[in-house]
Image (cartoon, coloured by chain):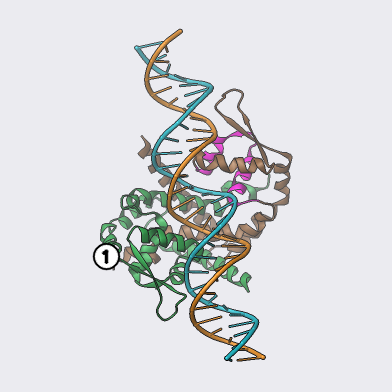
Chain colours: A green, B brown, C cyan, D orange
Amino acid sequence: MKEQFKLDNQLCFRLYTASRLLTQAYHPLLSEHGLTYPQYLVLMVLWEKDAQPVNDIAKRLMLETNTVTPLLKRMELQGILIRSKGSADARQVIVTLTEKGHILQNLLSDVPMKVGSAVICKSVTPDTVPALFGMLDDIIAKLDNQQNQNED
Amino acid sequence: MKEQFKLDNQLCFRLYTASRLLTQAYHPLLSEHGLTYPQYLVLMVLWEKDAQPVNDIAKRLMLETNTVTPLLKRMELQGILIRSKGSADARQVIVTLTEKGHILQNLLSDVPMKVGSAVICKSVTPDTVPALFGMLDDIIAKLDNQQNQNED
DNA sequence: TCTATTTATATCGTTTGCGATACAAAAGTA
DNA sequence: TACTTTTGTATCGCAAACGATATAAATAGA
């Protein structure tokens, strides 16, 4: 059996598993406030800059609008944000945080620390994290470029 | 705004994005044969060792049986594998590859190389991949341990 | 100006992923 | 043996993801 075919040699399986398990680590901290991890990502984007069109949020998260639109609708139902027609461009839908959406930033202030401490281990420390971030960023940039090229 | 809250400082978002984009890189190669990435993972498990109970496949992929069961049913419908009652333990369902499932190993033999070459970049090379694997494996092991402890 | 194309969102259908729960077979216990 | 607990799978419901497609508004071109 070819070595390349072994699960243990697959980068994608590691990323897939690490991503799932780390997302699960967020779950108890977020579900306490009725949130999912992708919803938490949307909140982080809007905390950085409020009142963004759907497209900007999708681009920031590198997701498609057909993923983000239903997600935003669910968050609107929860009263976390408001979706309103853009005034300059009537096609756009501008997403704005409500009071509840802003308050969540305080309620969730300990989440990054708690999850961060859960992943610290022998080979992943404040010293090595920058190298890990660099590799993941490079992978993401490479794959993103290739996708954009295929679209032309 | 707290630095910890910035999307750019989040490990989980990087893993989540890298995992999604890399899975998308598999898509054209797999859909050609009617497969999805999780189905490809199941195949890799069964190519390593055929005729395994559902539980062993789920454990190997670190997924729950309620995820794996429907996945296996779809693959059975496609004629890739067979689910049969275990003889020793009647609760078990043993999953066995069909001829088609074995043939797929040859049809997909160039997938690892193609996807592998798609992620090679400045900071991710044959020299640095072992370090990356080590860090991801440590993160996975740490999170897996914490989950198992919470269950007791 | 009128039409063609692009852009911003949304809808639809399918597959995952997972928490909660159900259920039957096996194992343990009194 | 009768009863309890554990184990292996499965069902259900919901929230992502995403390919394919639709729709209206804006833009470009003739």
**Residue at 36% of width from left, 63% of height from top?**
A43
State whether residue A135 appears in this view: no
| The residue stretch that appears in magenta | B35-63
Q: To which quarter of the image does residue A54 belong? A: bottom left
**Residue at 40% of width from left, 66% of height from top?**
B8
B124 to the left or right of B139: right
Q: Magenta includes A141?
A: no
Q: Position of residue A78 (x, y in %)?
A: 34, 57
* Type of the residue with mark 1: Glu
A42 to the left or right of B113: left
**Residue at 73% of width from left, 45% of height from top?**
B103
Does C15 appear above or below A70? above
Q: Magenta includes B59?
A: yes
Does B42 appear above or below A86? above
Closer to us: A67 or B45 = A67
Closer to us: A141 or B58 = B58
Q: Which residue is mark 1?
A: A99
**What secondary structure characterizes most of the magenta part?**
helix
Q: Position of residue B54 (x, y in %)?
A: 56, 35
Q: To which quarter of the image does residue B25 belong? A: bottom right
